[in-house]
Amino acid sequence: MDERRDDIDDTNNMNDFEIARALGLDAAWLDAARQVWARIAREVAATEEIARSNSARVLAALSRVGLGDYHFGGTSGYGYDDTGREHLERAFAYVFGAEAALVRIQMVSGTHALAAVLFGVLRPGDLLVSAYGAPYDTMVTMIGHDRRVRGSLADHGVKYLEVAPGEGGEPDYAGISRAADKARMVLIQRSRGYSWRRALSCADIGRIARCVKAVNPRAVVFVDNCYGEFTETTEPAAVGADVVAGSLIKNPGGGIAPCGGYIVGRSDLVEMAAERLTAPGLGSHAGPTLGFTRLIAQGLFMAPLVTGEAVAGSQFASAFLSDLGFEVSPRPGERRHDIVLAVRLGSPENVCAFCRAVQSTSPVDAGVTPVAAPMPGYADEVIMAAGTFVQGASIELSADAPLRPPYDAYLQGGLVRHQVEFAMLRFAQDLQRKPGQRG
């Protein structure tokens, strides 16, 4: 006897009904989401092609270095003669188009990796130039020139100069050339940080590097690559950057690496950073892997696919939130050079609702309610939503916002694009709107 219900048209409707019931959503929002996915299909397909190309590059690098199962045992203590670490670092160098790489679990964050480069290379009296406006909040604290911070670069006698973006948000190439004339290092932050400016492409970074080298060939071009890895088919070291750093719990860790950071670039600069991380004379020779080599290598292998999922989720969120009447950056259809989406929410209440929606659709701590609080390294109270498997892993879906006008929130990550979709649907539903209704 056929007990199929006549009031169910097809399997898709049944799936939507079950999804809505499981997630506490109105099924009408799922239909609205399908329409958005259909509208951005070409944009998402381009993202998938980037992931395909990057996957080939990573696979070729791991094969080229001859990574084997016996490299996953790890070392303890000093970590001398760790062949697995050496093979993995050579693979990172190939992937990122660099001479050398330092890939270590001892780096606790992207900021720590950046600090190893800054303090490893710069000396008292040197000039650091930020090429594209003020860097990220924790970097401002580390530089220490807007407020006195013990142990900052300013405290160590390093001078600092900032080149504001030009009209229209583009880099001020003429201003960068003037500032770079006496610089020891020019810092380029690829991602937007807590700002409305756009992320820089590798083409932008290459042009900045050429501007710097034309007036000062000895200046070190240093790229903060956080959030930008694998969003394009090339990386900053391949277009003129001397040294590049980032975090393994962002894009290049693929959602698998449990901790760590990386530095790639010219071998002398990478070694100077290594000597800051460990000690002069030890440098890159020390640093146990403690059995984490497999997870980091597996994360690198998965990174292009996972980054593509995060970008696709961001593309959906951009289109969906625009439909709700919110201003977003990047706008729908714009090329992506990082995994961050800025959303202008207009009020602290909307910011808190946005973060609650992200938290409640997370696989971990979904029942936790995020609240704004002071955070080390930040000038304002910050609200963060991050129901992640790895603490602070922003390749996993997360959102955070400093509670200051005009009340922008920053959405990043998403191991699975549909988690981003469901979070945005929850936010829209919590605003008590109906599909098609703008703000």
Image (spheres, grey):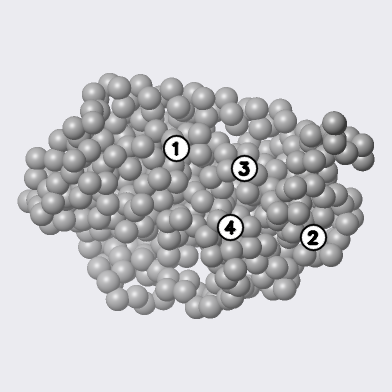
Decide: few, some or many residues near mark 3? Use Cα within 10 Å; few <14, some 14-19, many ≥20: many
Number of labelled discs?
4
Instruction: Give the distance between the C-alpha atoms of the residues marked 2 and 4, in whole angstroms.
Output: 16 Å
User: Which amino acid, by three-letter code, is at mark 1?
Assistant: Ala
Q: Nearer the viewer, residue 122 or 260?
A: 260
Residue sitting at x 44%, y 46%: 255
- Looking at the rendered structure, the secondary structure element under dot 3 is helix
Instruction: Give the distance between the C-alpha atoms of the residues marked 1 and 3, in whole angstroms.
Output: 14 Å
Q: Which residue is mark 1?
A: 303
Decide: few, some or many residues near mark 4? Use Cα within 10 Å; few <14, some 14-19, many ≥20: many
Q: Which mark is residue 181?
A: none
- Looking at the rendered structure, the secondary structure element under dot 1 is helix
- Disc 1 vs disc 4: which is toward the camera? 4
Residue sitting at x 38%, y 25%: 59
Q: Does residue 388 show up?
A: yes
Q: Which residue is mark 2?
A: 429
- Up the image or down, 293 lies above or below 155; here it is above
Tell me whether circle 3 and circle 4 mark residues in contact (CB < 8 Å).
no
- Disc 3 vs disc 4: which is toward the camera? 4
> Relative to residue 145, is residue 65 drawn left or right?
left
- Mark 1 and mark 4 lie on one chain; the one further toward the N terminus is 1
Residue sitting at x 65%, y 66%: 356
Quadrant location, the C terminus: bottom right
